[in-house]
């Protein structure tokens, strides 16, 4: 028996971008339903994350039309990056120590936020944001790493900040 086509299932043929929007809508329901397990991982790292979780998800969907940028943010949100800590849980013979500094456990938080060289990277990004926007901003992983939009800023300023942060996040795995 041939596999059912989208039209057979009552779906019309969709433009690829419209298809992504449909997938994002389906994933949103799933995402909001299973947030507890993702929030638990970030609990020691970020406070009151459950308050901002749906805003982070909405911002991730609107972050860019470029799938590479969205994929990067989704990997951070869902902790899909294979950090040394994750690899150690999958394969106990793998050393859980950070391959970059060789001193601390290589968790997602360490590799993307707390590693001293990454901290200086985020400080430079933060300084760039403040210089370009002439705004006093806080250096916060909710905004910088997870993509929570900043409130109370003009729309164009918010968009500029979002684009700079998308580019900054995308560079981290390649460093």
Image (cartoon, rainbow, N blue to C red):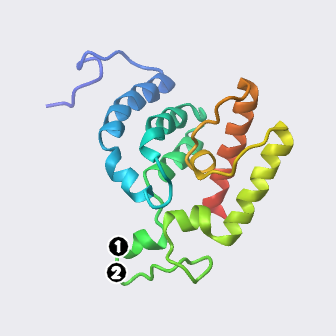
- Look at 26% across and 15% down and name the residue there: 10
Q: Residues within 10 Å of mark 1 (few under 14, many from 20)?
A: few
Q: Nearer the viewer, residue 42 or 60?
A: 42
- Look at 30% across and 38% down and name the residue there: 33
Is 4 placed left or right of 84 in the picture? left
The CA span between labels 1 and 2 is 6 Å
On the image, the x and y values in percent for residue 25 come to 39, 27
Which of the 4 image quarters holds residue 1? top left
Check disc 1 and report the residue beneath it: 89
On the image, the x and y values in percent for residue 16 come to 48, 26
Total marks in image: 2
Which SS class for mark 2?
loop
Which of the 4 image quarters holds residue 124? bottom right
Q: Is residue 65 above or below residue 73?
A: above
Q: Nearer the viewer, residue 173 or 111?
A: 111
Which SS class for mark 1?
helix
Q: Residue furthest left?
A: 1
- Find residue 71 and name its label: none
- Look at 61% across and 34% down and name the residue there: 64
Do the residues bearing badges 1 and 2 touch, measured as CB atoms within 8 Å?
yes
Viewport quadrant of the C terminus: bottom right
On the image, the x and y values in percent for residue 126 come to 75, 51
Q: Is residue 100 above or below residue 4?
A: below
- Find residue 92 and name its label: 2
């Amino acid at each position: 028996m041939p596999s059912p086509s989208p039209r057979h299932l009552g779906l019309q043929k969709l433009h690829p971008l419209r298809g992504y929007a449909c997938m994002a809508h389906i994933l949103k329901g799933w995402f909001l339903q299973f947030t507890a397990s993702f929030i638990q991982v970030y609990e020691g790292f970020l406070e009151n994350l459950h308050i901002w979780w749906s805003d982070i998800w909405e911002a991730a969907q609107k972050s860019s039309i470029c799938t590479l940028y969205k994929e990067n943010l989704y990997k951070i949100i869902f902790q899909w990056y294979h950090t040394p800590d994750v690899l150690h849980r999958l394969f106990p013979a793998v050393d859980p120590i950070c391959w970059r500094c060789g001193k601390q456990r290589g968790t997602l938080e360490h590799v993307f936020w707390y590693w001293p060289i990454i901290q200086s990277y985020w400080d430079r990004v933060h300084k760039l944001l403040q210089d370009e926007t002439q705004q006093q901003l806080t250096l916060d992983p909710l905004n910088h790493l997870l993509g929570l939009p900043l409130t109370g800023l003009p729309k164009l300023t918010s968009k500029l900040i979002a684009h700079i942060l998308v580019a900054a996040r995308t560079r981290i795995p390649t460093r």
